[in-house]
Amino acid sequence: MPRPMTMAEKILAAHAGLEEVSPGQLIECDLDLVLANDVTAPIAIKTVREVTDAVFDPERVILVPDHYVPNKDIKSAEQAKIVRDFAREQGITHYYEVGCMGVEHALLPEQGVVGAGDLIIGADSHTCTYGALGAFSTGVGSTDAGVGMATGKAWFKVPETIKFVVDGQLAPSVTGKDIILHIIGKIGVDGALYKAMEFTGSAIESLPMDERLSISNMAIEAGGKAGLIPVDDVTRAYMDGRTERPYTAYYSDEDAVFAEVIAVDAADIVPTVAFPHLPSNTRPVAEARDVRIDQAVIGSCTNGRFDDMRQAAEVLRGRKVHPDVRCIVIPATQEVYRRCIAEGLMDVFLEANCAVSTPTCGPCLGGYMGILAAGERAIATTNRNFVGRMGDPTSEVYLSSPAVAAASAVLGHIGLPEDIA
Amino acid sequence: MRYEGRAFRYGRDVDTDVIIPARYLNTSDPAELAKHCMEDLDVTFVEKVRPGDIIVAEENFGCGSSREHAPIAIKAAGVDAVIAKSFARIFYRNSINTGLAILECPEAVDAVAAGDTVSVDTDTGTITDVTTGTTFQAQPFPPFIAEIIEEGGLVNRWKKKLAK
């Protein structure tokens, strides 16, 4: 019998061809997928060419230009072209051109490219998003991704796992985003450094897939290597008929050893906002009402999925964005965009005076499509609020759920949907 | 390798967005990236930094994005080594892979003052504050990582492996 293992350890062991692994062990694994975007792929492609002539498997290398596309300027057009040319040359099946592309970590689960039990590396820190489907997926730099594309392999240090048990009844206004902000506020931006996070408990089980993806997405904001959620009926209902490849559900053994088990009472979690300049700088929204805003951004790999759009639209329906605020809505994929039209959300956004954009990471990383001037403030459903993240170094970003961002857009200051008269 | 230079001091959670802001990520040219290194944290860094200088910072250096442009920019700006109490995971891997020397040594971080001349021996992990004459020992790399460094980085390691 192998030693009792966590979900993370089991996935790594399976991909290293080992019966068991222990935290701290350095192992070489076979990768299911290797990803990169238009910012990180050009360097990864250079690495591939240094190592070999061809990628290890053109069906398992995923290239999603999403950061600066549709091209922001000539330089970014050149970057995107390097990716496009390489995809054509190598016959990459999962290359997503403008018009088909979406924000990578919203797109790949939606398209069934990623699934439970997969081992995935991506040259983008939010690759940890797929943990919500029960995959071990983690962000790496371009060289690791390039070597992965060339060889199908990567080395890993088996991480310890911190288990979070979120039990109890969530208030109706509390979303997956509030849960992860609450947790990061509790443990800090390096609270899970070098460790995997596993999110369990009745409150997690009660969440739809889109909100679970928001939780796993921000594991990296606590320094986490992965943000895993055990597979259940919600996961299976999401993946069945969607995933391209068969999937495997791995579960932590009852007697698995965790670095720490942190219990969170769902009833203690309230709508939360992270103040500048760290995602861990959290406060209840109810204590942030004096913060006036210039912009609201609703979108990104954290909160650009359909449920996010629906939650924002519910607040904006029949209302107008405050005249001092620009509200930018970015459905994260073409499919989300289409559903927004089909289900009438697009009319709600346009009636409310929101600007709606084609899918792009754009303003989340201060790329384009909503950059802040000196001293301006934005509330955003994105994932980082570092200095200069969305524009000028003196601008400020406050992180929240879609409903809170939408309510703040109407109010002109940070607030809750029920604050709107 | 042995490096010697002046210490630039920074605090905790120095993120990759301040090391190299995303607004400059429409290129991966090291010389271009170097022009904007640390810009949003310390606008004077680029004009002050000289080849061989060393960055000294508190916990969680390099947190945030996976951009390899961060260690590339630091190295291209002339910095040979970063000493910190701890490094964010992706930045740690990226530094090993791109050949930026990184050393974990809380004691040195607590002792070295901005502007001190510091020498670093990456083979032994010895850090000396030349200005004060104090010596510190950094955490050694696990053998596997040391091997990657010795082989000249991950790309060279694989080149050798595949040539066999």
Image (cartoon, coloured by chain):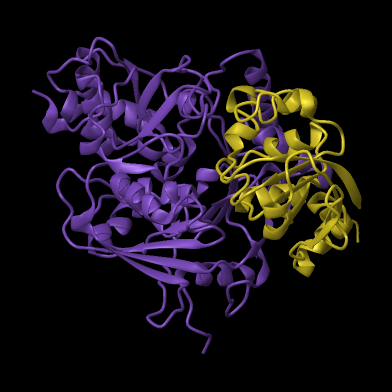
Which residue: 68% across, 40% down? B68
From the rendered image, report the letter of the chain displayed in yellow: B
User: Which of A321 and A90 lies nearest the eye of the viewer?
Assistant: A321
Residue A23 spot, x, y in % from top left = 58, 73
- Total numbered badges shown on the rendered structure: 0
Please tell me the colour of chain A: purple
Residue at the far front in the pictured view: B132
Quadrant of res A155:
bottom right
Which residue: 46% across, 42% down? A108
The answer to whether A71 appears left or right of A26 in the picture is left
Which residue: 75% across, 36% down? B74
Q: Where the C terminus of chain A falls, by quadrant?
A: top left
Quadrant of res A299:
top left
Residue B145 spot, x, y in % from top left = 77, 62
Residue at the far left in the pictured view: A421
User: Which of A222 and A23 lies nearest the eye of the viewer?
Assistant: A222
The answer to whether A128 appears left or right of A282 in the picture is right
Which residue: 12% across, 25% down? A420
The answer to whether B104 appears left or right of A300 in the picture is right
User: Which of B84 and A400 lies nearest the eye of the viewer?
Assistant: B84
The answer to whether residue A240 is seen in the rendering is yes
Residue A167 spot, x, y in % from top left = 23, 64
In the rendered image, the vertical position of residue A123 relative to residue A359, given as above or below: below
User: Which of A171 and A99 lies nearest the eye of the viewer?
Assistant: A171
